[in-house]
Image (spheres, helix red, strand yellow):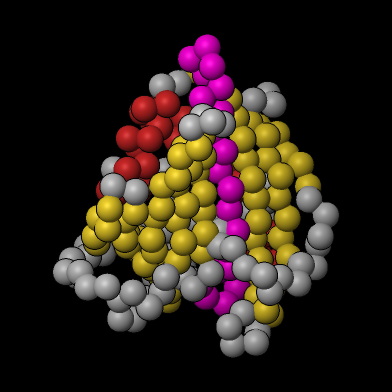
Amino acid sequence: MEFKQKKISYQGKPFILYCFALIALSSDITAQDKTWKDAKFDDGKIVSQYRVGTRIDEGGQKVPLIEYRTTTTVNADLADCITLLTDIPRHTDFLAAKTSELIKAVSENEWIIYYHFAGSGPFPDFDCIATMAREEDKQKRITSFTVTAVPTLIPPRTEKRYSFYNMTYSFRDAGDGKVEIIVSCRSSPPFAVPQWMVSMGFPAVTSGEIKKILKLVL
């Protein structure tokens, strides 16, 4: 696959410590904590399930594994939710990314995107090159967007890079002008970080993206 590489800007808002709590699918999981925990936000209107464990990475090292699934149902326009996800530069409005660049529109249902995250304190800058695929289930009235890291699509830069990252945003027409929003995550940090430090961000981190999405579509 060939595409023209765009120049990426590296100036923007500060890094959020736990923004790496995003997600990727894998079968080589060895979770330390196999029990899912529950959390509620905004008087129970937002519900989350989460766990922090470990997995074995490509180099045979044990690394943190972050998983969560957060849901809410609100009065919203489904079309507005879909438009938000297809407008790639606006991903910075609900992620902690400093920049979100469209590298290539492969089709009307697939995009190649680049995220850059600014480091803070001891944490380095890091990035993610990924594909985003849209799937629509008309019978269930669900439209989903899945972002999956493909780290080799562009040459390495000076930043650390996500190799294990998957995040799915699903929007279901719940009828009567309501939309169910589901944010599902699974990831490992792109740099070395103690698991206890990752765990400190929970459960608050599980509601981060969905709260920002609500502000943009309501």
Judge whether residue 26 is colored magenta.
Answer: no
As rendered, which of 51 and 202 lies closer to the eye?
Answer: 51
Instruction: Answer above or below: position of 75 versus 196.
Output: above
Q: Residue at x 60, y 73 (%)?
A: 193
Asked if residue 218 shows in the view, the reply is no
Answer left or right for 162 relative to 18: left
- Please state, as top left, top right, bottom left or bottom right, where the C terminus lies in the image: top left
Can you say whether 73 is above or below 157 in the image? above
Q: Taking 93 as reference, is 211 left or right?
A: right
Judged from this view, the residue extending furthest toward the bottom is 59
Q: Position of residue 135 (x, y in %)?
A: 45, 45
Residue 186 lies within the magenta run: yes
Residue 189 pos. (x, y %): 55, 68
- 105 with respect to 39 (left or right): left
- Residue 30 position by quadrant: bottom right
| Residue 67 appears in view | yes
Residue 45 higher or lower than 38, as above or below: above
Query: In front here: 188 or 108?
Result: 108
Q: Tell me what residue is drawn at x 58 percent, y 83 percent.
A: 58
State the image coordinates of residue 150 (x, y, percent, origin top left): 42, 70
**Magenta region:** 171-193
Q: Is residue 34 left or right of residue 89?
A: right
Query: In the image, residue 47 lies at what x, y percent?
Result: 68, 34
Residue at (42, 43) in percent of width and height: 94
The one of 63 and 87 positioned closer to us in this rendering: 87
Count of numbered marks:
0
Identify the image quadrant of residue 49. top right
Q: Quadrant of the N terminus?
A: bottom left
Chief secondary structure of the magenta span?
strand
Q: Residue furthest top?
A: 176
